[in-house]
Amino acid sequence: MSALKIAVIPGDGIGTEVMPEGIRVLEAAGKKHGVDFEWSFFDWSCEHYAKHGAMMPDDGIEQLRAFDAIYLGAVGFPGVADHVSLWGLLIPIRREFDQYINLRPVRLFEGIPCPLVGRKPGDIDFMVVRENVEGEYSAIGGIQYEGTEEEVVIQQSVFTRRGVDRVLRYAYELAQSRPEKHLSSATKSNGIIHSMPYWDSRVAAVGVKYPEVKVDQYHIDILTANFVRMPDHFDVVVGSNLFGDILSDLGPACTGTIAIAPSANINPERTGPSMFEPVHGSAPDIAGKGIANPIGMIWSGAMMLDHLGRSDVHDSIMKSIEQVLKEGSCLTPDMQGSATTEELGKAIAEAI
Ligand code: NAD
Ligand code: IPM
Ligand code: MN
């Protein structure tokens, strides 16, 4: 097998601290399983913005197109407005490569203190499938009558039939492939929101082809409560761009720390590269201290290898994460330990 060509964008803040650990673990797992990597580094970030007035060069998307996958740390840092940094780098990558699925697993591991009383590993193990290129994250809208008493800001949500149906199909397929065959849909069709009754109608229509899948739906308000009250109920949870974003921080928080959560921004048709990044951001409050938890980054790397056809490498990385967490002697502060980013990354790489 020729080397996998990976575009690496460490980005901002702790993105630059967890990325070396992700690469360290992938190198160790690759060595064991006969996978070579060719890493190409891109310094696109808020620092790049300060120097060049843009988060990435004009032809940035074209530079990424030929890679097998994109491995990204985090984007955004005080000094550059978030809507500028994110719409200048992260969001265009998701959209230009039609990464319309954002897959975000949630799992309670042995060894991480769980904030929910009485929950044990195995009780929390589900997948959030987030629509990733449309919905509430639309570029349509803006401010009018700026600076006057009439000032108004309008934001349009965009839900296309093609966009809704394809994320629902993916979620149904995923649910069908799992033992519980259970899909929960995040909605808010009791509010004055045109998009959500439509979303519900497509859940029903697309579901006709998946009679084995048990479906339920919850309004987003009670759904957040149910993540806390009965996390064992969930198997696959599908949501719009904004609902999926919120649920995919809440889910991992219920397992002890958001910092272990990975994500795969997938283009299922493979008409462009997919992107793998932790769910968390650049964490300016702890950046530079060397204490960020690298597991979200490392697990995202495992998902990248799974996507590239190497489930053996994925499984090997996951086993090492499980082993190190279970041993419990090398946890970062967000998991009530005192290990550094590098110590935890090295421990997982050694466990491979
Ligand atoms: P954040 O995820 O960066 O931080 C939230 C909290 O979680 C902070 O207290 C932080 O210290 C903690 N945390 C996050 N990751 C951690 C890790 N690996 N180890 C230990 N603790 C960790 O979210 P935020 O504060 O809302 O956003 C900060 C910046 O990151 C903003 O500019 C935001 O837009 C950006 N952001 C980027 C992404 C991305 O690139 N995908 C995702 C979320 C936020
Ligand atoms: C995430 C992040 C991003 C999102 C932000 C930074 C634009 O929160 O990946 O979850 O909302 O998609
Ligand atoms: Mn988010």
Image (tube, helix red, strand yellow):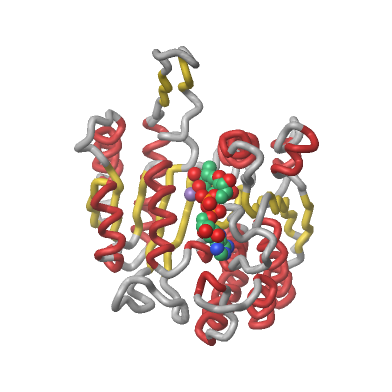
User: Which corner quadrant holds the C terminus?
Assistant: bottom right
**Residue at image x 22%, y 35%?**
191
Q: Where's residue 251, x and y in %?
A: 39, 60
- Is residue 291 or residue 187 the one in the foreground? 291
State the residue in front, 319 or 49: 49
Q: In the figure, residue 65 lies in which quadrant?
A: top right
Rendered image quadrant of residue 49: top right
Residue at figure coordinates x 50%, y 76% from the top left: 336
User: From where the camera sits, is residue 192 visible?
Assistant: yes
Q: Return the residue nearer the eye: 174 or 233.
A: 233
Q: Tell me where residue 82 appears, x and y as whole percent.
A: 58, 39
Q: Is residue 303 left or right of residue 256?
A: right
Up-down relation of residue 166 to residue 210 (above or below): above
Q: Residue at x 47, y 54 (%)?
A: 103
Q: Is residue 267 visible?
A: no
Find residue 35 and report its horizontal and vertical position in percent.
72, 68
Across and down, in percent, residue 248 comes to: 43, 54
Quarter of the image where one finds residue 63 = top right
The residue lying at 38 percent from left, 37 percent from top is 164
- The answer to whether 211 is drawn above or below residue 30 in the figure is above
**Which image quarter holds the N terminus?**
bottom right
